[in-house]
Image (cartoon, grey):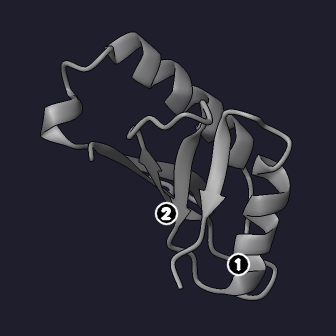
Amino acid sequence: MPAVEAARDTIPSSLPDSGEFACEQIDVAPELADHAPRYVERVLGELRTAVAGLRCPVHDCGPSLTLDFGFDDAGTLDVVGHNCCAKLDEVVSNVLGGIPLFRLMVPR
């Protein structure tokens, strides 16, 4: 199934004395490149907005997610969490639970 990898973390700023700032890493599977790019970008934008600024309360890292565009009858997209711990999974689940488009799946 085609997927988009979305990871958030921090990187050092190139400006002196400005610390770190949040960044995103998005990897799109090659077979998805021509698959409704505007829809993909809209969905990615919604997911980025939803998880913007989320941090693990235990490890202080951002979520790492895979967005699965394999469509099902429920009309939702699976968001698979590859997070550091169950606490961050819970934080992401609470946020995404209010957005009917996304369904968080946590690998066991």
From the image, tell me which residue sits under label 2. 12
From the image, tell me which residue sits under label 1. 60
Residue extending furthest front? 73
**Residue at the location (59% across, 54% down)?**
22
Seen from the viewer's position, the closer of residues 30 and 62 is 30
Callout 1: helix, strand or loop?
Answer: loop
Q: Horizontal placement of 54 versus 33: left or right?
A: right
What amino acid type should be assigned to the residue bearing mark 2?
Pro
Residue 19 % position (x, y): 62, 63
Tell me if mark 1 has few (under 14), some (14-19) or many (20+) residues whose alpha carbon lies within 10 angstroms of its own.
few
Residue 3 % position (x, y): 33, 46
Seen from the viewer's position, the closer of residues 21 and 36 is 36
Marks 1, 2: nearer the viewer: 1
Residue 74 % position (x, y): 62, 36
**Residue at the location (73% across, 67% down)?**
55
Q: Is residue 56 visible?
A: no
> Which badge, 1 or 2, is on the more N-terminal residue?
2
**Residue at the location (53% across, 19% down)?**
42
